[in-house]
Image (cartoon, helix red, strand yellow):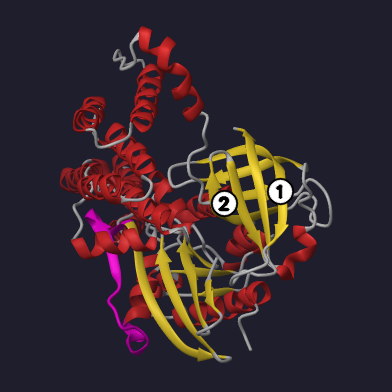
Amino acid sequence: MAIFNAKDRIIECKIVFYGPGRCGKTTNLEHIFKAGKKYTKSDMVSINTKGDRTLFFDFLPIGLGKIRGCDVKLQLYTVPGQQKYNSTRKLVLKNVDGLVFVADSLEVRREANILSLKDLQDNLAEQNMDMFQMPVVMQYNKRDLADDGIPILPIEVMDKDLNSRLKAPYFEASAFKGKGVGETLKKSIQITLIYLNKKLKWSQ
Amino acid sequence: MSIKERIKELVKEAELYRSQSLLNQSKEKYLELLKLAESDESTSKNKKLINDIKRRIKSVEGEINEIEEADKKSPELSEDVQNLISSLFSFSQNQATAAIEGAVALAKFGQYDKAVKELERLVKEGPIPLQAAINLLRCHLSLASPEVALNQYKRWESREELGKGDLKYLQKFLDDHFKKKGIDIQLIEAGELSSGGKAVEEKSDDLIDLSSIGIQFPEGKFKGKMWEFDVSFQSGNTVSIIIPLVKKDMAEIFKKGLRLPNIQCTSPIAIFNGSGVVVQNSNITTGPKRGSFNVDIRIDGK
């Protein structure tokens, strides 16, 4: 849960980018870091292994300034997508306030997307959190690959696979080209802050 | 689509997956390509093409192996990143528990040396040395070897760094672990068990330090719902939680004697399910939490 300092009117919240391995979670954060340098005083921390795979997590702190009289600080994280790193994902998910699920549009990653979303639901449940009650934004990434003739999943199929019950707001994106990243983050911040306001009454 | 076009398409796909580090998918595409090339009359005798595909498959397999090898070792991170991990992954509001959580997080992220150093410091200087010591032993047992854990215990014993009760507790902890894992080491001698066993047993029944508990309400307005509370204080098996005045309706459900059959206990080292009973519910009358409710719960089932 977010930390709200009512005296100094500071709220710190945590948004986690989740999704299967190599779906573009780190690329999302890298783009946010480059595009939003004025909002961040520190570097993005990435702990990678061979092949630029996230080994532990990526971390990017961002200051959003004052919103409704409150200083809003964001902590953005990614989890390692590979299946074997589940204990790390659980640790990174602890005290999460908002989620961005980055789905890979490649046809060959259809099953990986579904498994990752199930894994997210299970890991949240272990911490007594219900994915269906959380502020979640869906991002269908790598849409640009269709232009290169690579088979990708139609949006309708992805939405049916991943979002038919969740009914989360979704965005098409190409994190590699920076498309759709800002919109995804903006929506995630918006719904996460609304969710936290219901719980913590942080807004004036 | 001609065979030439199909081959081009498959190569393009395989290379794209490879560039994205989706190496298994890349290999599959190359295998599909090889099958196609070997089965088609126009290409089956083209040795150059077939060898080229085989060479690419081998190369992708090499990359897969390299990644698997790299994943076996955790990299030693810079001190700044280690400190960041400690601070980002310690969640308790209790400083002593948070310090242990930070050190345990380091171990979970494979930073064994730093985790050991930090836990050793907490054993010597921290306010809850027993919890630090248990975590240090766990760290040795999971990331090093039983011998390292045993030597650590013997050092504490010889230097008298920990109290007798704590040492007995650790002794029992190690013995139980060795027994469970089928390791033939026994620290407690038979005679010792009959004379001093009771004290160890009593202590070992104590609950490990909890940072939070999730309670499923058995009755009232919130019946069936699970709610997480930070543990504000713990004495043995009794934990205290504070419920703010704004949640008076919730606090009032916790009547003395109420059984709580489903409690999820979270400690820096484990999450487990338990049950308990409300032993006290009082109103805080002084200090910054004035008006809030202090609820004491005795955890009696693990």
Q: Residue at x 33, y 34 (%)?
A: B163
Looking at this view, is A114 or B247 the one in front? B247
Against B289, residue B42 (above or below) is above
Give the residue at the far top of this rendering. B191
Q: Provide residue A54's location: percent of width, then percent of height.
A: 32, 58
Q: Gap between marks 2 and 1, in whole Å?
A: 26 Å
Is residue B41 rendered to the left or right of residue A21? left
Q: Give the secondary structure at mark 1.
A: strand
Q: Chain of mark 1?
A: B
Against B197, residue B100 (above or below) is below
Q: Which mark is residue A127?
A: 2
Per the image, is B110 magenta?
no
Looking at this view, is A99 or B45 the one in front? A99
Of the residues shown, which amino acid type is indicated by label 2? Gln
Q: Provide residue B27's location: percent of width, then percent of height.
A: 31, 46
Q: Provide residue B191's location: percent of width, then percent of height.
A: 37, 7
Q: Residue at x 26, y 29 (%)?
A: B153
Is residue A202 rendered to the left or right of residue B27? right
Q: Which residues are magenta?
A: A34-55
Q: Is residue A20 visible?
A: yes
The answer to which quarter of the image holds residue A188 is bottom right
Is residue A48 rendered to the left or right of residue A164? left
Q: Which residue in the protein does label 1 denote?
A: B280
Looking at this view, is A37 or A117 the one in front? A37
